Image (cartoon, rainbow, N blue to C red):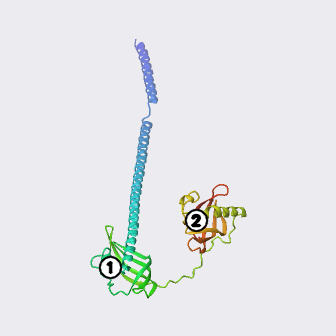
Amino acid sequence: MLILLGKEARIIKKWLEKIKAMSNQVKENQEKKKIPEIPAQKSYKVFKIALWVVIVIVFLIALMAVIRQARTIARERALETQVQTMNKQVRKLKEESKQTGNIDVFGRYFVQAYYDTNQSGDDYKKSLSKYLASGVETPTIDNAKGTKTPASVMLWSQDTQDKTTKLAYLVNYNYASKDNKDKTSGAEIIHFEVENRNSKYSVVSVPYTQYVPNFKTTNAKKATNNLDGKEQVSATIKENVQDWLDKTFLPKYINSKDITDVQYIMKNPALLGGSQQYKDINEVDVYKDGNDLIAKVTADVEDTTTQIDSTQEMTLKLRKDGGNKFYVESLKHTLGK
């Protein structure tokens, strides 16, 4: 009986050991199948870092876009301000130009009135009162021995500061005594100041005259052909240019009074208007200038009133306009630059 119980106990012990072994095996298998926690944590950290990097990059891109937009707006505003400033300057220049022209006209009228002394003293003062500011005295002409009659009045100088402009005119005059026995001619400069108030003018200083200084010339030489010595175009091209100038351009430019005659052959249409008549070409030199031509021309002309002969010197920049025709890009009345 005891032997049987011992065997059964051993059998039960073996089964228990097998069960324990199987249990341990199951635990080992379960541990092998478990997902490690450390790699998962690392993946989450990497994901968080990548997400923040993306956020920072997007933020920086957005910030740069805002900065660029702000700079663009600033440039546009600066450009707008610059344009407004330029427009103001243009308007100011136009106004100044207009005022300058008006003051010159006023000054010329005053000069004519100032020299018109062939009248009574009262009438003279009355004629000048339209130009003089209150308190500016007029010359006394009652004892005048003769009259200076302006033959020409030319603006000598002009200086504007604030509302006041200093004017000076060169007056070439013919003098005649009251008995007409003494007749001479001369020149002098008359100075006076004009004040501008709301586009209304008045002479605010007593006019005075000054002798005309002797003009001295410099030792400068006559303007000559600055391309002289350089290689010219072929004889055929030169002949074509000369023929077009002689038969088409110069007669229209010098003789005509109708601007439409040169509109189709000049970039900036202009005329001399017939005060002189074209006779012929004295000399012409033609040079290559890129795709264009430079023509140095000396032409013979005649004054339509006095029939006095003289010459005209020109530098023309020409563009070929099909066949043997040309188009004047620019024209200067000099053989120099």
Q: Dot 2 lies on which element?
A: helix
Compared across the picture, whether 145 is left or right of 251 comes to left
Residue annotated with mark 1: 124
Q: Residue 290, position in %: x, y?
A: 64, 61
| For residue 25, above or below residue 104 | above
- The residue type indicated by label 1 comes to Tyr
Residue 335 visible: no
**Is label 1 in contact with label 2 (beta carbons under 8 Å)?**
no
In space, the residues marked 1 and 2 are separated at their CA atoms by 45 Å
Q: Residue 335, position in %: x, y?
A: 61, 71
Camera-nearest label, 1 or 2: 1
Residue annotated with mark 2: 255
- The residue type indicated by label 2 comes to Asn
Q: Identify the residue at image location x=43%, y=79%.
A: 150
Q: Dot 1 lies on which element?
A: helix
Q: Residue 152, position in %: x, y?
A: 45, 77
Q: Residue 33, position in %: x, y?
A: 46, 28
Quadrant of residue 120 within the rendered picture: bottom left
Compared across the picture, whether 277 is left or right of 143 comes to right
User: Front-most of 71 and 158?
Assistant: 158
Residue 285 visible: yes
User: Front-most of 290 and 330?
Assistant: 330
Compared across the picture, whether 300 is left or right of 9 comes to right
User: Front-most of 185 and 328?
Assistant: 185
